[in-house]
Amino acid sequence: MTDGHPWQGNWVVRLYERVREQGYDSLTAFAEARPTASLVALAKELGPDDVAGVQVFKGLVAEAERSNQVTRLVRGQLVRELWACLPNGWPAVLDDANRFDVAHALGAWVAFTPETHKDRADKVGDALLAMPPPPGWLPLGPDDELLRTLLPDEEV
């Protein structure tokens, strides 16, 4: 029993029990079925009171490391952050308000990026700012063509 506290009890076991209850064999499969949902939204779906977004991400990182898919996970997290911060897609003009939203998305993404990929993530952010994608661009998942170009599947 957790009494609504995500860190009480064995949260890893609880997390994977919830994933299986949803009909998935892995947390990755569960998350990839919802590629634009935030970590908080994923956590709420798994346990509205006793699963936290950071727990979901820790589980996703562990699975990605075991399957050598960390770069794909990093791209997927960028998709989640872009959807959270830029729901109408990449802005046509980077005025102060839009620049803040873009910086928020990229900053949150880099914060969640595992240390092994931080340098690459910084370069992706720089590239997106230097040569912005088309207005309205909003990737639907980690296999987006532009994302794969910016962050190919070479594991570091």
Image (cartoon, rainbow, N blue to C red):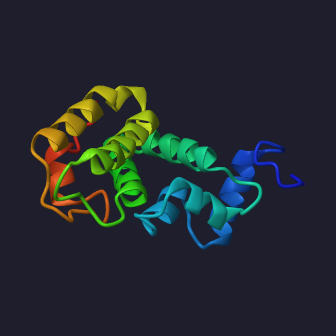
Compared with 87, 12 (above or below) is above
Outermost residue, bottom side: 23
Which image quadrant for residue 91? bottom left
Residue 84 lies, in percent from the top left, at 43, 58
Quadrant showing the C terminus: top left
Provide residue 127's location: percent of width, then percent of height: 15, 38
Q: Is residue 9 left or right of residue 153?
A: right
Identify the residue at image location x=52%, y=41%.
62
Residue 7's x, y, as percent? Answer: 77, 42
Looking at the image, which is closer to me, 139 or 145?
Answer: 139
Q: Quadrant of residue 109?
A: top left
Residue 68 or residue 136, whichever sits in front: 136
Residue extending farthest to the left is: 131
> Residue at 89% of width from left, 54% of height from top?
3
Dividing the image into 4 quarters, which one contains the N terminus? bottom right
Q: Is residue 39 left or right of residue 142?
A: right
Is residue 131 at least partly visible in the picture? yes
